[in-house]
Amino acid sequence: MDTLPPLNSLRAFEAAGRLQSIRRAAEELLVTPGAVSRQVQRLETFLGVRLFRRDPREIVLTAEGEQYLEAVSRHLDGIREETQKLTGKRAKEILRVRAYTTFSMKWLIPRLRTFSESNSSTEVRLTTSNEMVDFERESVDGAIRLGDGNWPGLEVDRLMRNELVPLCSAAFAAEHAIQSPDDLRSVRLLHSLVRPDDWRFWLQAAGNQDIDPYAGDKYASSTLVYQATLEGQGVMMAQRALFLDDLRMGRLVQPIDFSLDRGDFTYYFVYPRNRLRSPAFRRFREWLLAQADHADHAENQPLQSDRAGVPV
């Protein structure tokens, strides 16, 4: 065989294999799923090799398909790169990332500028949700999720520690003279309905059994709890890594010097292995892990205080 395989079929195969979905490949290529299926079948006929195993709900690469996809992807990436160098035009690559609202607002978005500045040809589309992603049905490349790290069938990168601490405004801490867990009896606890047990975990670890961990005001999200805390309405239980800037700027203080590390129950970057075939995705993942590592080192640095005892 001394001729090239049909190039449209190669494109369809690469997209379907990379995305592990005929439907998503069709959306990317702006054709119908039937057209993608026909092109893949045409390539299989040309090669005389079965590239996919077709199940009722999904397609799965065969061993031969995996090997061929790696080679095809490498060469297509090379053609794209050389074309961009020759023409001086870089096509926009779109990355779809899912995260939590508070994590996005307090940690991810403030850092995204550094990724965009060095990856001008990549467009990050960030959406938020508390629900786990169905990568087979949703157009999402990677998700930042809170859990124990056990997501069968997916690649998982640990991002940071999940250290729970009580936070409030400096004025609120001073007004109520909060210094120990016992001082929380006389103040209002603030809760997120999506994280209803955080106060119970922390109070038990602090050795306090007689404060009702579910008493106080409840809000639909951690973002609303954060705003209520800034307004001096009570004390929130927070993940310290997300609020370091607030502590350093003095917007919030940690009135009690006790934290609870939830161990393996923390934030992870979760994604299907096939996403690693995308150079843009690999760059984003490397950037994200580097940012998390840098933030972890920064978190270990002690917070300095001014004369009034407010972290700055």
Image (tube, grey):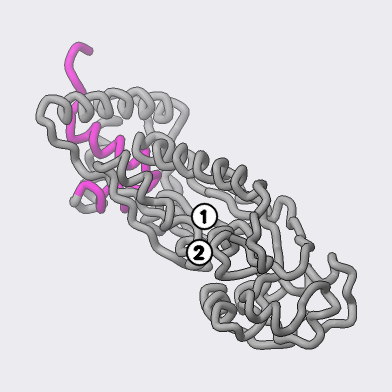
Residue beneath disc 2:
100
Nearer to us in this view, 153 or 36: 153
Q: What kind of secondary structure does the magenta stretch mostly adopt?
A: helix
Nearer to us in this view, 203 or 11: 203
Q: Residue furthest top?
A: 2
Quarter of the figure that contains the C terminus: bottom right
**Which three-letter amino acid code belongs to the residue tagged 1?**
Ile
Residue beneath disc 1:
144
Position of 140 compared to 171: left or right?
left
Nearer to us in this view, 109 or 11: 109
Residue 302: x %, y % from top left: 68, 50
Residues in magenta, as a range: 1-29
Residue 296: x %, y % from top left: 61, 46
All told, the count of numbered labels is 2
Q: Which mark is residue 94?
A: none
Residue 261: x %, y % from top left: 75, 56
